[in-house]
Image (cartoon, rainbow, N blue to C red):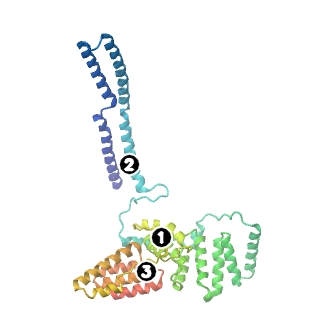
Amino acid sequence: MAFWIITLGLALAIAGLFALALLRAPRFATTAADYDLRVYRDQLSEVERDLARGVLSAADAQRVRTEVSRRILAADAMADADSTSGGAPKIMAAVVGIVLVAGSFGLYRGVGDTYGLGAPGYGDLALADRIANAQERRSTRPDQTQAEQSLPPATPLEGLDENYVALVDKLRSTVALRPDDVQGHILLAQNESNLGNFAAAHKAQRAAIDLKGASATVADLTDYADMLVLAAGGFVSPQAENVLRTILARDPGNGPARYYMGLMMSQTGRPDVAFRVWDQMLRAGPADAPWIAPVLAQIPDAAARAGINYQIPTIGNGDALRGPSSDDIEAAGDMSGAERIEMIEGMVSGLSDRLATQGGPPEEWAQLIGALGVLGRRDQAAAIYANAMQVFAENPTAIDLITRAGQRAGVAE
């Protein structure tokens, strides 16, 4: 409550300053009508002086008086109109006050579905607390069944050919009678997906994978994960995450699995990890990959939520952020000890900043952790190590590389 009282007081104080400026301005302003009245009165005085000197005749003087008097009446009427509009500054002051107070509240809380700039009732959270909160959200999120049940009933797709629908219905009956038919389950999963029946599709795909056993391919698992996510309305459930981890263990560069892992991180409060995964995917490309479009649609929001000022890179340019090259290391051999340390410090600082804002391959993270260990900056090395373990959580090969770098730096067991 104290927060809102202070905030309201500040908004009203600022609105009061604006209102005071608006209300005081007319006191010192001279209108055009006031200026005209002074001119016309001077003209009347001049007529009397000209008449006394004999410059004007009595008839001409009367004619001039009549014309000037008419103009004085018109100017006086205009001055009265200006005086009646004196309430305009008050109205404007009231409008400014309302806009400042209501606008500040709207920006803080957000309007409709738009994110606001604040979270009333919550203090600033340290990074460790945010990571802990994200881990709790991740561990307590709904499972696949709960996610599917939370969605409204699926509506049949429009414009479907009746003969095609009849054939799929016949396929269902056939597969039910032949539960050991692997191809039948795969065909059913594909056609259920075509009809938008993703829950039925992932069940058929799961049956096919179980029948295949060890011979199930990465493509089979990728299709299964895709069906799970689509059946949950785009939500990555724990079941889907397990499938994605199995895929990445066999194919660390699998595009759909990496995209969905980034999506899961975004959904569970780690937009920073989602951003880094997606940014690496954009840089790796290719530009015509099916996951590029959804990454482009979501990475600006992930970057904003992670507090990163981001520009979309050239897709597929392979713009990896490298550390010291072999030429840099060779040049360092000719430097004094102090110069060499200064150069390494600069490289480490630049690499750390770039990895924090744009991400990079696991080799760079391992290189940075090792360099920090050599420099004796173990606290920073430990923080980078913990962050890297989060970024590459779905990549076993990268985790192994980073773990070994952490061990050399003395920050991992």
Residue 150 shown left or right of residue 134 in the figure:
right
Q: What element carries label 2?
A: helix
Q: Name the residue under label 2.
A: 101
Q: Name the residue under label 3.
A: 361
In the image shown, does 371 or 41 lie closer to the viewer? 41
Instruction: Give the residue type at disc 1.
Output: Ser
Marks 2/3 in contact by CB < 8 Å: the verdict is: no
Quadrant of the rendering where the C terminus is positioned: bottom left
Nearer the camera: disc 1 or disc 3:
3
**Badge 2: few (under 14), some or many (20 or more) residues near its Cα, within 10 Å?**
some
How far is disc 2 from disc 3 in space, using C-alphas?
47 Å
Tell me which numbered mark, 2 or 3, is placed earlier along the sequence: 2
Q: Mark 1 points at which residue?
A: 266
Residue 267, position as x, y percentages in the image: 49, 69
Marks 1/3 in contact by CB < 8 Å: the verdict is: no
Camera sees residue 412: no
Residue 200 shown left or right of residue 293 in the figure:
right
Marks 2/1 in contact by CB < 8 Å: the verdict is: no
Tell me which numbered mark, 2 or 1, is placed earlier along the sequence: 2
Residue 366 occupies quadrant: bottom left
How far is disc 2 from disc 1 in space, using C-alphas?
33 Å
Relative vertical location of residue 83 with respect to residue 252 in this rendering, above or below: above
Residue 331, position as x, y percentages in the image: 29, 86
Residue 265, position as x, y percentages in the image: 47, 73
Residue 43 occupies quadrant: top left
Residue 295, position as x, y percentages in the image: 51, 70
- Residue at point 35%, 37% (across, down): 89
Quadrant of the rendering where the N terminus is positioned: bottom left
Tell me which numbered mark, 1 or 3, is placed earlier along the sequence: 1
